[in-house]
Amino acid sequence: MKIDFANLQVQYQKYKSEIDASIHGVLKKSNYIMGEEIKQLEAELSTFTGAKHAITCSNGTDALLLALMAMDIQPGDEIITTPFTFISTAETITSMKAKPIFVDIEADTFNINASLIESAITDKTKAIMPVSLFGQPADMNAIQAVAKKYNLKVIIDGAQSFGATYNGKTDSNLGDISTTSFFPSKPLGCYGDGGAVFTNNDEYAEKIKMIRVHGQNKRYHYKYIGMGGRLDTIQAAILLAKLPYYKKELGERERVAKSYTNTLTGNLTLPIIKSNRTSVWAQYTVKVNNRDEVQKKLQDDGIPTAIYYPVSLHLQECFRYLNYKENDFPVAEEASNCALSLPMNAYLTDDNISYITKTLNNI
Ligand SMILES: Cc1ncc(COP(=O)(O)O)c(C=O)c1O
């Protein structure tokens, strides 16, 4: 049996007529840069998430940069975040010449451990940047409480969690600014690079829109130092064609996750979704001690898996200057040694899932 990890081709075939028509609409108009599809998509993203402002941009990394630039983060400012995430989360902090301050994660959700944040705060701390890892928001009530106590901003890196909720609200609403990525394999993906920034704050929204286009407030007049951070109109058109099916796709991802959870046994730690949250299941990630052996055996049986993330950020060469060392964040380090993500997409059949779980249970 051949199992696909993300199954982008099957998804395209399913929505081909809508996606092709939407792309051709842009080709006909040749409105490749900031065409009307961008505005239309932003309106639909705002409705979907409940965030007052949805501002599309070039990718999920630039979305984080736009958030940090809008907050006027300065060299030497400290931003507290998780070491168990994709590089962009901390990379963008350093791009601003600010300093990422890592705190350890929770063993059950892989997300930042909110109870450790307070002890990492100094007089240089400006913001907290939680990540909704693998599709589930972090403990936002606790994070917001500490942010309020110390007058800190909250930026949510929601690259993996578009549509995920915490106490009934999407995480696009839960930070001063939140972001997402539309990288092709993300739960809602386009066919190239794409991202978005969300905020309920009018001033941030205005500033982000200008920074996205080189800080321009009037043609060839520049109020801020900005960047070339626009989303292509063609990518917006693809997302417009896919968005109406997204809720259904999330339901299918939930079906796959539930099946995994109900059938997997043995020496695995299964992912936990907290009762006040939903996950969009960007990944279904288990923890297993003999990971290399398990991964190899699954691969031999035609089951692709992925390791997110093999080295915690505090131990990466590029962050050596921060002087972290092994055992500083034992829970993140354990996750980097044991986490294994199973195939996850809306098109895994019951037979596929049964084959994957049986194979894994037999190892
Ligand atoms: C947690 C996290 N943050 C940021 C990003 C960056 O998104 P992009 O690849 O669209 O720049 C990703 C992408 O994988 C991610 O997983």
Image: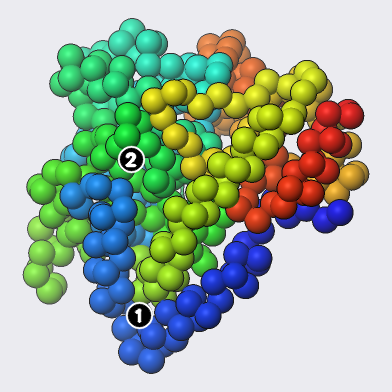
Mark 1 neighbour density, 10 Å: few (under 14) some (14–19) many (20 or more): some
Q: Nearer the viewer, residue 220 or 292?
A: 292
Q: Position of residue 158 (x, y in %)?
A: 40, 41
Residue type at the position of mark 2: Thr
Q: Residue at x 39, y 73 (%)?
A: 237
Q: Which residue is mark 2?
A: 170
Q: Residue at x 46, y 23 (%)?
A: 274
Q: Residue at x 25, y 54 (%)?
A: 46
Q: Nearer the viewer, residue 265 or 316?
A: 265
Which dot, 2 or 1, sits closer to the camera?
2
The outermost residue toward the top is 119
Q: Position of residue 86 (x, y in %)?
A: 52, 38
Q: Nearer the viewer, residue 162 or 63?
A: 162
Q: Is residue 335 visible?
A: yes
Q: Which residue is mark 1?
A: 32
Q: CA distance from mark 2 to mark 1?
A: 30 Å
Q: Earlier in the sequence, mark 2 or mark 1?
A: 1
How many numbered marks, from 0 up?
2
Q: Position of residue 56 (x, y in %)?
A: 31, 59
Is residue 78 shown above or below 221?
Answer: above
Is residue 326 shown above or below 25?
Answer: above
What secondary structure is marked by label 1? loop
Give the quadrant of the C terminus.
top right
